[in-house]
Image (spheres, rainbow, N blue to C red):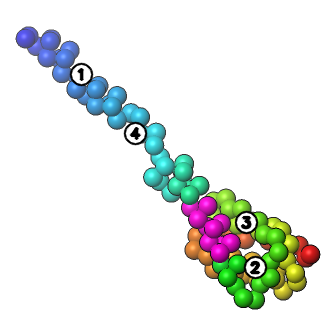
Amino acid sequence: MNGSSIKRFGSIPVLLALLAGGPLAGCASGIPGFGTVATVDDAAISAGVRNAIRHDPELTVSDLDVDTYQGIVRLSGFVSSADSVAAAASVARTVKGVKSVRNDLRLK
């Protein structure tokens, strides 16, 4: 092999490595706030809020919907008293990962 052959074929392993690793570069799901990690965290937060509200003996909730997006929880549905509206938001704020609570609960 002469010098030009080495230059020409010497970059092939580098090119193959870049091509093999290229698809992995688009997988940002392991970084918080990107891809499925945020979705899973939001789903876990919603489940935690539902569980905390359901197990609070002071709350009587007849119809509750919890939606979470980037740690912001939205409570909607119906409760039996004005105290329950405030208490549900207070309980939701205690769940790990909750950044803020938008309380759209209504009296039934």
**3 left or right of 96?**
left
Q: Please, which residue is most extreme toward the right here?
A: 108
Q: How far separated are the C-alphas under marks 2 and 3? A: 11 Å
Badge 2 is on which residue? 88
- Please, what is the three-letter code of the amino acid marked with disc 2? Ala
Q: Earlier in the sequence, mark 1 or mark 4?
A: 1
Circle 1 crowding by C-alpha within 10 Å: few under 14, some 14–19, many from 20: few
Which type of secondary structure does the marked residue at label 2 adopt?
Answer: helix
Q: Residues within 10 Å of mark 3 (few under 14, many from 20)?
A: some
From the viewer's perspective, is the residue at label 3 or at label 4 nearer? Answer: 3
Query: Which quadrant of the figure has residue 54?
Result: bottom right
* Marks 2,1: beta carbons within 8 A: no
Q: Between marks 3 and 4, how big is the CA–CA gap? A: 34 Å
Q: Identify residue type, mark 4.
A: Leu
Mark 3: which amino acid?
Val
Which circle, 2 or 1, is nearer the viewer?
Answer: 2
Mark 4, secondary structure of its residue? helix
**Residue segment shown in magenta:** 41-51
Q: Which residue, given by chain and number where applicable, does mark 4 sit on?
A: 24
Q: Earlier in the sequence, mark 2 or mark 1?
A: 1
Label 1 close to label 4 by CB (< 8 Å) = no
* Residue at x 56%, y 58% (from the top left corner): 40
Q: Could you tell me which residue is drawn at 22 percent across and 26 percent down?
A: 13
Q: From the image, state whether disc 3 or disc 1 is nearer to you.
A: 3
Instruction: Please tell me which of labels 2 and 3 falls first in the chain.
Output: 3
Q: Considering depth in this image, is 82 or 12 the residue closer to the camera?
A: 82
Query: Residue 91: percent from the left, percent from the top?
Result: 69, 81
Q: Which residue is mark 1?
A: 12
Q: Is residue 17 left or right of residue 23?
A: left
Pick the quarter of the image with the N terminus: top left
**Residue that numbered label 3 is attached to:** 66
